Image (cartoon, helix red, strand yellow):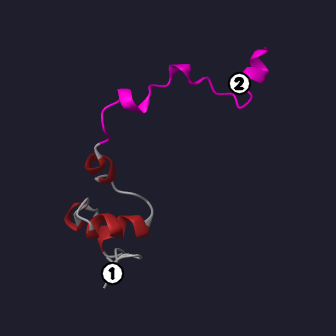
Amino acid sequence: MPAARRYARGGDLTKIPKAADTPPADLFKILNVDTSNPYLRAIRIQRGFLRLEDLPLELRSRVAVPSRTPGERQ
């Protein structure tokens, strides 16, 4: 079978570790980083992943932390 046909999408998955062989992802470490998306930034502050005090001064005034997120019960 030609290589172009065998990997039609261009991916060789033999070098990618299986999920069962990798440690669990530390979501706090991943979400503890600021984002350029203002909505995600507000959610991360609301959920405790980011602190408003840790943001640069120019971003603090632009953060509107929602009182609740979509799908959350009142």
Residues at badges 1 and 2 in contact (C-beta under 8 Å)?
Answer: no
Residue identified by numbered label 2: 7
Location of residue 18 with respect to 27 vertically, above or below: above
Image side of residue 4 versus residue 41, left or right? right
Image side of residue 14 versus residue 2, left or right? left
Secondary structure of the residue carrying numbered label 1: loop
Residue 52 or residue 27, whichever sits in front: 27
At horizontal 34% and vertical 74% (from top left) the residue drawn is 63
Q: Amino acid at mark 1?
A: Arg
Q: Measure the C-alpha gap from mark 1 to mark 2.
A: 46 Å
Specify whether residue 8 is painted magenta.
yes
Q: Splitting the image into 4 quarters, where does residue 58 fall?
A: bottom left
Residue range (magenta): 1-25
Secondary structure of the residue carrying numbered label 2: loop
At horizontal 40% and vertical 57% (from top left) the residue drawn is 35
Task: Report x, y in % for residue 2.
Answer: 79, 15
Residue 59 or residue 13, whichever sits in front: 13
At horizontal 31% and vertical 85% (from top left) the residue drawn is 74
Q: Main secondary structure of the magenta part?
A: loop
Image side of residue 3 versus residue 26, left or right? right
Q: Amino acid at mark 2?
A: Tyr
Residue identified by numbered label 1: 73
Task: Report x, y in % for residue 38.
Answer: 42, 68
Location of residue 44 with respect to 72 vertically, above or below: above
Of the 4 image quadrants, the one containing the N terminus is: top right
Location of residue 53 with respect to 13 vertically, above or below: below
Instruction: Give the residue furthest to the bottom.
Output: 74
Location of residue 38 with respect to 8 vertically, above or below: below
